[in-house]
Image (spheres, rainbow, N blue to C red):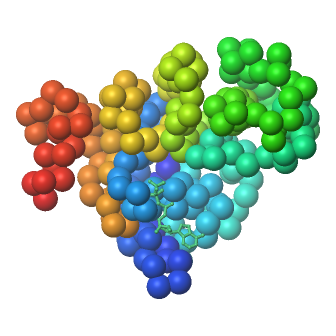
Amino acid sequence: MITIENLRKSYGKLQVLKDVSVSFGAGRVVSVIGPNGSGKTTMSKCILGMVLPDSGDIKIEGESVLKKYAYRSQIGYMPQIGRYPENMKIRQVIQMIRDIRKDAKVVDEELIGLYGLEGMYEKRMGSLSGGTKQKVSAALAFMFDPKILILDEPTAGLDPISAEILKCKILKEKKRGKLILITSHIMSEIEEVADEVMCMMDGHVKFHETIADIKAHTNEERLGKAIAKIMEEE
Ligand SMILES: Nc1ncnc2c1ncn2[C@@H]1O[C@H](COP(=O)(O)OP(=O)(O)OP(=O)(O)O)[C@@H](O)[C@H]1O
């Protein structure tokens, strides 16, 4: 579904992506892991067209998406920290996005309901707690039934019940054939929702394997231990 070929990106002298090639298939949840600053968000932003790579290509269903924009309506994005106009009410933000996406055939309001956001519609974005802002971001990311979801540390700041709601939603959408890329540092969470782990290190793909293969070839039951073993080995 997404194929990344020889992607490179530098910010000034800092080479953040050094020849990244990887592909992700439909109906999969892929956890993108790696140390802080290893280039995970930069790769996601390249897929989203928010950062232009210096070289390489990104294809979605076989077609290059570089310098194009129509494809973005197929991607739902939940940023690490959602930034919204402070003065707008939740209701207005949701309405604004719905107006921008008037063309959307499906409007999925499941998370709005499960998170009880209607009850908070008149609150201004600037007055919301970090977790509530995350809930708005999650609801918006899933709203237009995108084929691809990119979720950057989606459960950070969510209480356990709200995190559980999001994990159930991720698994439900995966079953419907979506590709979901999740950046997370929480091993237990990765183990619960992901099928594959892609590990970035120093701008390269360190490994990209299914969780079952990672456990099998390291002979470790716990994913955290298995990953630590791979890091030590290489
Ligand atoms: N717009 C930018 N201008 C300059 N440097 C940047 C920019 N965006 C990111 N960087 C740098 O690129 C490197 C990779 O950042 P990136 O956000 O992709 O890492 P990450 O793996 O997502 O990290 P984290 O786990 O902390 O979220 C970092 O050193 C960061 O400071």
Residue at x-position 86% and y-position 29%: 123
* Residue at far bottom of view: 13
Residue 63, compared with residue 80, is above or below; it is below
Residue 175, compared with residue 88, is above or below; it is above
Residue at x-position 52% and y-position 36%: 156
The quadrant where residue 103 appears:
top right
Residue 83 versus residue 39: which sits nearer the camera?
83
Residue 164 versus residue 159: which sits nearer the camera?
159
Residue 70, compared with residue 1, is above or below; it is below
**Image location (x, y in percent) of residue 3:** 46, 54
Residue at x-position 54% and y-position 16%: 161
The C terminus lies in quadrant:
bottom left
Residue 197, compared with residue 70, is above or below; it is above
**Image location (x, y in percent) of residue 135:** 67, 29
The quadrant where residue 117 appears:
top right
**Image location (x, y in percent) of residue 20:** 39, 64
Residue 10 versus residue 22: which sits nearer the camera?
10
Residue at x-position 69% and y-position 30%: 132
In the rendered view, does 20 fall on the left or right side of 114?
Answer: left
**Residue 55 visible in the shown view:** no
In the rendered view, does 192 fall on the left or right side of 162?
Answer: left
**Residue 36 visible in the shown view:** yes
**Image location (x, y in percent) of residue 23:** 41, 51
Q: How many marks?
A: 0
